[in-house]
Image (cartoon, grey):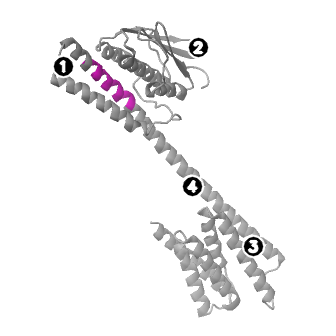
Amino acid sequence: MKWTKDALWAGVVLVGVYVLTVLQGPPLEFSGFVLIVLTCALLALRQRFPIWVAFGTMAGCGIYYPFAGSAGPLLAAFVIALYSVAATGRIVVAIGIALLAMVGIVLGEAASPARHLDDISMFMLVGWLVAVIALGAVSHGRRALVAEAEKRATSEERLRIARELHDVLAHNISLINVQASAALHRSGKETEALGAIKQASKDALRELRATLGVLRQVDEQAPTSPPGLGQLGDLVERTRATGLAVTVDGEPRALPADVDLAAYRIIQEALTNVTRHASARAVTVRIQYDDKDMLVLIDDDGRSGEVKPGNGIRGMTERARSVGGDLTVRGDATGTRVSARLPIGGER
């Protein structure tokens, strides 16, 4: 596609240069026509070999103007080639080619018995070359920004998917593992089926974290799609099925979509951590609001001691920060508390 487009541009330039040259007169000699065709044809390769095309068009102009016996705008081919060099980010090379062209023009004017360019024309030519290089640099910068934005959007989408997979699958696989362990404990003997479920869920959880951990970053924006606190009841019921007594204090209310999702995921991850690590019997989830913030508190009565941050705590912290809030986790003699402050009003 690029080849076709460049070939079309080369044809357009060739026709334009030829027509204007014929209109300006004197009559165009065959050698001049050949030089115009060869020089303009090089533009079909300007995307593949921009530097070589710039040198080729410069050489074509350098031969054409002194020896072809005709004037005309063939210099436009060199200007387009010079723009292509700058548009690929080779600004220094483009400046060097432009300086070399100006040196050649000055030497050619000095060696010619009659001047073809006066001081004003020479100044205007320099201005055109500088403007062309500047336009090429701007074009390169714009394309680089677009490419970076597309790359960032792709990366953010990948990270969003990784976070959602981790939060959903890790939670449910953890519950499967806990329920299988509880069933084994109550049965008094290990059955093959329950043992297989317990081991499979443990292995799946480990591999899931290893795989998705490669994709996780701290600067990602929280997604703005369901679920939210409206599904808190289902989450609590699934957690209660593991034998953990869960109490909820506070009612969900209308929230910004990103805050609603962040609050749900924080509670989900906190309950997952309690079922897997805390050896707790009961946990209380409190949801409180004021004019600017909501406060989510998750308290359990599990073992106390120093809380070591793992993937779960880091994930909850990232969730809170992604919407402009903060999160703390601390343990004491009565258990562990997860406290998240999430802004719901004003500027975030």
Q: Quadrant of residue 132?
A: bottom right
Residue in view at x 70 percent, y 89 percent: 66
270 falls in the magenta region:
no
CA distance separating discs 2 and 3: 65 Å
CA distance separating discs 3 and 1: 89 Å
Which segment did they paint magenta? 166-179
Tell me which label, 2 or 4, sits earlier in the chain.
Answer: 4
In the drawing, what numbered circle is on residue 291? 2
Tell me which label, 4 or 1, sits earlier in the chain.
Answer: 4
CA distance separating discs 4 and 1: 63 Å
Residue in view at x 48 percent, y 7 percent: 333
Query: Observer-nearest residue: 304 or 321?
Result: 304
- Which residue is identified by label 4? 143
Residue in view at x 22 percent, y 26 percent: 197
Whether pointer 3 and pointer 1 mark residues with C-beta atoms closer than 8 Å, the reply is: no
CA distance separating discs 2 and 1: 53 Å
Return the x and y of residue 118 as percentages of the image width and height: 82, 79
Dividing the image into 4 quarters, which one contains the N terminus? bottom left
Q: Quadrant of residue 121?
A: bottom right
- Which residue is identified by label 3? 125
Amino acid type of disc 1?
Glu
- Which residue is identified by label 1? 190
Amino acid type of disc 4?
Arg
Is residue 122 shown above or below 247? below
Residue in view at x 60 percent, y 82 percent: 18
